[in-house]
Every structure is written in C-alpha cells, then in structure tokens.
Image (cartoon, helix red, strand yellow):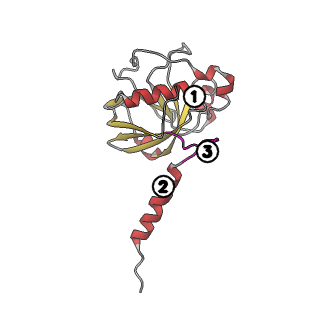
Amino acid sequence: MKIPCFHTQIMQLSLLGAFLATIVSCNGEQLPNVTIETQKGNIIIELYPEAAPATVANFAKLIAAGFYDSVTFHRYVPGFVIQGGDPKGTGRGGPGWTIPGEFQDPALRDKMPPHEKGVVAMARTQNPNSAGSQFYICLTSDPRSVGHLNGSYTTFGKVIEGMDVVEALRERDVMTKVTIKNYTPSE
C-alpha cells in the first residue's frame, strides 16, 4: 500500500494560492494587494488603481503610515457590509482630510467593480467628496441589498482570499496589522 504524499499536495495548494494571488491588471502589470491581519485570520484584497487612482493612492498612503494598524471594524450589518477605518471607532472619524468621490467620473466609474460580495468601497457621508479612511466590504451579491450603492460609492478593490474571515468579523474586531504590496505611487 502506497502512502499519499501530503507534502506534495500542500506544495501544489501553496503554488495554486500564490498563482491566484498574483492577479494582473488589463495592461499586464501585477495589481497591488493588501493584507489585513485580524485575530480571526488574514484577508487579502486586490486593488484597482486603474478604476480609482486617487482612492488607491490614499488607501496606500494610510497603510504605509500604519494608520489602520489596531483600528477596529466599527460597523457590522448582517447580509450587507462590515465597515472599518475610523481611528475613533465611532463611525465619525477619519485621517483629517477627504478625497474626491471618483464614482462621479463616468470614465472611472465604468472601470469600477459593481457592489457584490467581497467588493471594497470607500464609506462617506451624504457629501460625495467626504471619504477619508473608512471603507466597507460587501457581505452579499444580492442586488436588493447592495445594488443601490452602485454608482454612488467608489469601489476600488475586492477580497481575493479570506472571505470566510470577512464573514466572521463583527463590530469591534481589530485590524492588527495592514500591509500593501506591489504598489508604487504615481507622481
């Protein structure tokens, strides 16, 4: 009787995971990706700088500064979103500045992914140019729940690994460490 080689199977799965995490943009460049470490596991998000260049640049700047490290997810709505990025943890905080709502630009909006499970978007007030650091991750693809958000919020990324972790997150869970790879700010 031959014993299966589990090391080979694990190696194959690791290579597959590495391949899936190495996603490329339309022009052949590797897309930036963000790792959010939590006590429930890690989440990997690919970012879309071609769809939301200013939003991705702002998100990367905040990550590089350690802004999100130890910040909580302050809002959880079952079957809708998990939201974080407020250093105060109240839903009213931010980095001290705001960025333009890139969803207002039709050319960029056409490149943005629609709201569906795993999509990452900037949270904002009723002012379309009020986003700063708060973001949300969609928990459903049901258009009755998230369809109304399309065209009204800047979507700039998608979870490519760890959606089970996202679904386990609740209010007050902490982003212990957030890092970014494959991103070079354009000047």
- Of mark 3 and mark 1, the one earlier in the sequence is 3
Image coordinates for residue 98, horizontal then vertical, percent: 47, 16
Magenta region, main secondary structure: loop
Label 2: element kind: helix
User: Residue most toward the bottom?
Assistant: 1
- Of mark 3 and mark 2, the one earlier in the sequence is 2
Horizontal arrangement in the rendering, residue 169 relative to residue 52 (left or right)? left
Magenta span of residues: 23-32
Asked whether the viewer can see residue 152, the reply is no
Tag 3: amino acid: Gly
Image coordinates for residue 105, horizontal then vertical, percent: 65, 21
Residue drawn at the location 31% of the way across and 31% of the way down: 70
Image coordinates for residue 117, horizontal then vertical, percent: 55, 39
Q: Which mark is residue 52?
A: 1
Q: Quadrant of residue 178?
A: top left
Residue drawn at the location 48% of the way across and 55% of the way down: 17
Check disc 3 and report the residue beneath it: 28
Q: Nearer the viewer, residue 18 or 130?
A: 18
Asked whether the viewer can see residue 99, the reply is yes
Q: CA distance from mark 3 to mark 1?
A: 17 Å
Tag 2: amino acid: Gly
Q: Residues within 10 Å of mark 3 (few under 14, many from 20)?
A: few
Q: CA distance from mark 3 to mark 2?
A: 19 Å
Tag 1: amino acid: Ala
Q: Is residue 46 above or below residue 99?
A: below
User: Residue most toward the top?
Assistant: 127
